[in-house]
Image: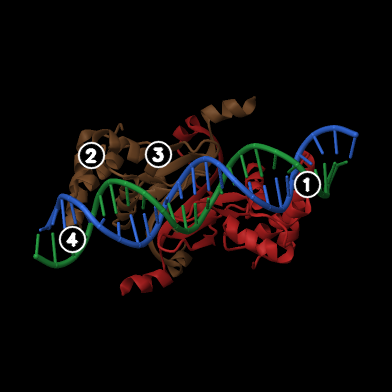
Chain colours: A brown, B red, C blue, D green
Amino acid sequence: MKINKQEIDQRMQHFETVCRDEGIKLTPQRLEIFREVAQADDHPDAEQIFQRVRGRMPTVSLDTVYRTLWLLNDLGLVVTLGASREPTRFDANLQSHHHFVCGQCGFIRDFYSNDLDAIRLPDLIRSFGEIKATHVEVRGVCRECAVKLRK
Amino acid sequence: MKINKQEIDQRMQHFETVCRDEGIKLTPQRLEIFREVAQADDHPDAEQIFQRVRGRMPTVSLDTVYRTLWLLNDLGLVVTLGASREPTRFDANLQSHHHFVCGQCGFIRDFYSNDLDAIRLPDLIRSFGEIKATHVEVRGVCRECAVKLRK
DNA sequence: TTTAATGCAAAAGATTTGCAACATG
DNA sequence: CATGTTGCAAATCTTTTGCATTAAA
């Protein structure tokens, strides 16, 4: 959780606004769960978020975490990442950004690039449907795993 | 399964070569499973591949399909896709290509673009690890789902 | 013949659901 | 107060594992 406080507050703000606009109830569980995703920079999965929220709110249940996460996803407040061979992970960073994913251990690292953000997609794609977001996924082997593989 | 026969044969050829080079046994199950992925263009998941192979080889088991698929992945013969909220899907297309993914139904459509293939990544990324592949993922809502959502 | 791969059944892991109790707007 | 949300427990779905049997090289 290395996201700065100001950014977190801004995300919380946005979350509350969206909920009010959509007529979705702001329960303490939702607030805690969203806060946890909003302040995480490691793309945690549902189980990890559950454990972290549990620290502050011992009565939350895992199924509420799942329900909330997918709700957030439907509201466009978080985005999912399918790391290879691992459970779905969640990301509250709505800025345009890209990912490096280690195919061995699932490590994900964000990176930013104006060049990549400026990508122009082939016109053909509009015939597939409506475009919501575009991001570049770089697959590789992270430093740590590269060492292990050398053995 | 709309991949043309020549391309399928080429993929099978490559598969057999890699297996021999790596000292991996060419069993009838592996041949059938790989063929099924090689000729599919709809990015099927393990269960779908299992059902299709089963048609021709009624005795294969689902766990062999899983084991084989991950083996193929480790060998670099297929690539995985984590469509949102769905089981892992597999793709034997090793050409550089990109994906349009529908966040509602998981529909995935390939597309090609020389411009996108020519993407230059920030140098920073090399510090994360070794790069194996880069692809662009476009998220959106496919035509069919757009209609449903309008209701 | 040696070693690896298969099938089966059972286990583990991830995610979802039904429902009664409860809290938000 | 009405309706949506929660927690619990149970169910479901996906994926993995142990082990005896079988088959490839």
Question: Which is more toward the observer, A121 or A100?
Answer: A100
Q: Label 3 is placed on what type of residue?
A: Asp
The image shows residue B135 at horizontal and vertical percentages of 51, 49
Q: What element carries label 4?
A: loop
3D distance between C-alphas at marks 1 and 2: 52 Å
3D distance between C-alphas at marks 3 and 4: 32 Å
Residue B122 disc label: none
Q: Is residue B130 above or below residue D21?
A: above
Q: Label 1 is placed on what type of residue?
A: Thr
Q: Is residue B119 above or below residue B142?
A: above
Residue hosting label 1: B17
Say which quarter of the image contains residue A38.
top left
Q: Is mark 1 on a helix, strand or loop?
A: helix
Q: Is mark 3 on a helix, strand or loop?
A: strand
Residue hosting label 4: A23
Residue hosting label 3: A110
The image shows residue A96 at horizontal and vertical percentages of 35, 47
Q: Mark 3 lies on which chain?
A: A
| Tags 4 and 1 on a common chain | no
Say which quarter of the image contains residue A120.
bottom left
Q: Do the residues labelled 4 and 1 touch (CB within 8 Å)?
A: no
Residue hosting label 2: A8
Of callouts 3 and 4, the N-terminal one: 4
Q: Label 2 is placed on what type of residue?
A: Ile
3D distance between C-alphas at marks 3 and 2: 17 Å
